[in-house]
């Protein structure tokens, strides 16, 4: 089964091609990774690569309750406990660097308005507030050129802090309708300066962030997640293929190790007719590793890798309820009965150990587990 074969990602040797997708769990009071986080990630270190949940690089980037940050010493120390335990059990882990932009509310920001490239609010949906209530989205404050530079610097500091925290690399979150995609997309970026208008101008903020991060990390330890124009968080683009294609090419020029591309899927609310195939686009425009994400199971993940559509497959919800997902896939491929458990959506976000660190491992007496979770049937 090719999905379970080793893979070289920059300097990292992955024992299999399963990636744990960055999964927000909203369990981190004061935006500091909680005491259960080391156990949670170490339980899932059987993955070829763990991508830690989206982590804000600045307090202005917060948009959800109890999400972790990487902008204070306390946060760095808490993340260090995570990476130390993951490494102790043979795992590899990178951190996704995040800023939600307009997908926030002044209730998260000490009364300040959320920021965005342009003063265009999210229509329709209501934002969950820290106290559990909901409110209409606000018209965001458009970032000045000086404020853009400050935000880019926050990404650089977040990247430096990720290195201090012991991560193996970083991923730039340029997808899902958050700040970087808000700059990329024509529907949310109506600027007339160097950061708006043409596709190269709208990609400029992503390039600035990338250059800043590469001041702290070698390019072969950095990746980017893209999904421009899928409609996530209300972000749309007039020509998502042209915009995303150009962005991916510039990331290739920068030497990044991978592109993490999402296919439209029902779970993300982006499964719409006519959506571009970002996996295919990444394969065409990016010469190195492509990670495919988007509601894959074992069968279509294996097919995607075998057909060369992607090099690695990112799994989200299956890793929540199946900490040892690669072992279960290996057992299934060997004809053993290793069921894939279904996660309880009521415990996705918030709470304690229930639905977080209490999902059981699968056990079978006729399977020998080797270090780094490679399995063979005895």
Image (cartoon, rainbow, N blue to C red):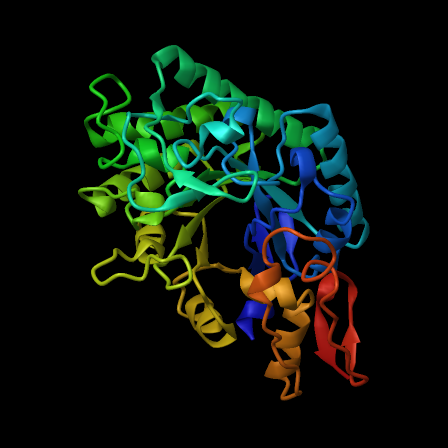
Question: Viewed as shown, does residue 115 lie left or right of 313?
Answer: left
The location of residue 247, given as percent across then percent down, is 32, 37
Question: Viewed as shown, does residue 5 lie left or right of 81?
Answer: left
* Depth order, front residue of 177/280: 177
* Depth order, front residue of 64/129: 129
Question: Viewed as shown, does residue 109 lie left or right of 37?
Answer: left
Residue 17 in view, yes or no? no
User: Quadrant location of residue 332?
Assistant: bottom right
The location of residue 364, given as percent across then percent down, is 77, 82
User: Quadrant location of residue 113?
Assistant: top left
Q: Which residue occupies 60% across, 76% down?
A: 340
Q: Which residue occupies 64% across, 60% down?
A: 47
Q: From what the image shows, is residue 317 above or below residue 341?
A: above
Q: Quadrant of the N terminus?
A: bottom right
Question: Viewed as shown, does residue 277 lie left or right of 160?
Answer: left
Residue 103 in view, yes or no? yes
* Depth order, front residue of 96/378: 96
Q: Quadrant of the C terminus?
A: bottom right
The location of residue 76, given as percent across then percent down, is 71, 30
Q: Which residue occupies 79% across, 48% down?
A: 85
The location of residue 219, given as percent across then percent down, is 52, 34
Label tally: 0
């Amino acid at each position: 089964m090719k999905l379970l074969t080793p893979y070289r990602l920059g300097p990292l040797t992955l024992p299999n091609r399963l990636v744990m997708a960055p999964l927000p769990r909203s369990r981190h009071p004061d935006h500091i990774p909680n005491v259960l986080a080391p156990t949670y990630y170490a339980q899932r270190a059987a993955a070829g690569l763990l991508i830690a949940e989206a982590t804000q690089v600045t307090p202005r980037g917060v948009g959800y309750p109890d999400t972790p940050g990487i902008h204070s010493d306390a946060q760095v120390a808490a993340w260090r406990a995570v990476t130390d335990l993951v490494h102790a059990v043979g795992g590899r882990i990178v951190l996704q660097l995040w800023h939600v932009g307009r997908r926030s509310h002044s209730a998260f920001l000490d009364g300040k308005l959320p920021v965005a490239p342009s003063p265009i609010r999210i229509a329709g949906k209501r934002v969950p507030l820290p106290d559990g209530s909901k409110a209409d989205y606000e018209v965001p404050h458009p970032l000045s050129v000086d404020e853009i530079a400050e935000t880019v610097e926050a990404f650089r500091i977040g990247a430096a802090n990720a290195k201090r925290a012991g991560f193996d690399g970083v991923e730039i979150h340029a997808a899902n309708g958050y700040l970087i995609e808000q700059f990329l997309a024509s529907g949310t970026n109506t600027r007339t300066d160097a950061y708006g208008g043409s596709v190269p101008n709208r990609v400029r903020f992503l390039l600035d962030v990338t250059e800043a991060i590469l001041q702290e990390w070698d390019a072969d330890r950095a990746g980017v997640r893209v999904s421009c124009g899928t409609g996530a968080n209300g972000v749309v683009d007039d020509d998502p293929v042209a915009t995303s294609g150009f962005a991916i090419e510039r990331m290739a020029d920068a030497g990044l190790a991978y592109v993490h591309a999402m296919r439209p899927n029902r779970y993300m609310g982006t499964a719409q007719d006519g959506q571009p195939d970002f996996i295919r686009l990444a394969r065409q425009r990016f010469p190195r590793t492509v990670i495919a994400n988007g509601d894959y199971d074992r069968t279509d993940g294996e097919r995607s890798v075998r057909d060369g559509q992607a090099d690695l497959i990112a799994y989200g919800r299956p890793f929540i309820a199946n900490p040892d997902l690669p072992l279960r896939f290996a057992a299934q491929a060997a004809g053993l009965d290793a069921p894939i458990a279904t996660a309880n959506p009521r415990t996705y976000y918030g709470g304690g150990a229930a639905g977080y660190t209490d999902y059981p491992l699968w056990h079978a007496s006729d399977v020998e587990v080797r270090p780094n979770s490679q399995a063979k049937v005895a």
